[in-house]
Image (cartoon, rainbow, N blue to C red):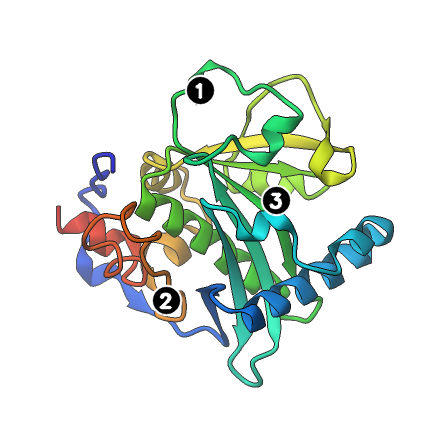
Amino acid sequence: MGEVVRAPVALQRGALKEEWLPFTIKLVNSQEDLDKAVQIRHEAYARHLPEFAQTLLRAEGADHEPGVVVLLAESKLDGSPLGTMRIQSNRFRPLTLEQSVTLPAPFCNATLAEATRLGVTQEAAGRLVKTALFKSFFLYCHMVGVDYMVIAGRAPIDRQYQRLMFSDVFPGQGFVPLKHAGDLPHRIMSFEVETAEQRWFEARHPLYQFVFQTIHQDIALPPYGNAEASADAAEWPTMGMTARFATQ
């Protein structure tokens, strides 16, 4: 795994706070979990892309491939699914979006992770669930040594990633049709993991405290498989990123 970025001097361990969420986020590890993820995935897509959503009534082959994990957010109240996201690294095969585009040179020798099949509940908690799923995506990528997080977003969803400081992989090219998304046009964007903390700190990003200075024990991410995470990877994803950096 690459060298860990140090936190700015101004950030101290005492600045951390602990916050409990009304839901938990975990990696899918059973058929029951996967069924819940598929349920919320289908419901989310059906609201905007009803025809495409009919292809998502069942789990996809990609859900079971090496290098793929599925996140599931569940209500603490009744265990109902509130959100999901699939993450695929390029350690075993090219990213799914590479069926449709050739990534530029900076990405050719990098470790990448693509987030797909994001879906959240339409309830009031939906926005918080989506934000927590992004934090989980980032924590997971940092934990396993990913260089760039990659997404493909439809309009206007792409603007959400722009606000998260994702950058265009193909500046000026606009939206491109993707085979795995029914040939719908998407904007392909990336986010450098190693510099994220510093960039968000300097930009005074409104979610900086939530991602880097808040301990969310409800986000429980175990190591990536048996060999791809560092020895202490199971310890720090729920500790808050600044705590990890501040001890270096």
Residue 200 position within the rendered picture, expressed as x and y whole percent measured from the top left: 39, 41
55 sits left or right of 135 in the view = right
Give the camera-side residue of 32 and 172: 32
Give the camera-side residue of 82 and 128: 82
Q: Amino acid at mark 1?
A: Cys
Residue at 19% x, 55% y is 232
How many other residues sit within 10 Å of disc 3, few (<14), some (14-19) or many (≥20)?
few
Residue that label 3 marks? 160
167 over 105 or under it: above or below = below
- Residue that extends furthest to the top in the rendered view of this protein: 105
Which numbered disc, 3 or 2, marks the residue that appears first in the sequence?
3
Which numbered disc, 1 or 2, marks the residue that appears first in the sequence?
1
Which numbered disc, 3 or 1, marks the residue that appears first in the sequence?
1
User: Disc 3 to disc 2, how far (Cα)?
Assistant: 22 Å
Residue that label 1 marks? 108
Residue at 58% x, 19% y is 102
147 sits left or right of 54 in the view = left
Residue 79 position within the rendered picture, expressed as x and y whole percent measured from the top left: 56, 80
Tag of residue 216: 2
Instruction: Label 3, secondary structure: give it.
Output: helix
Tag of residue 44: none
Q: Nearer the viewer, mark 1 or mark 2?
A: 1
Give the camera-side residue of 65 and 214: 65
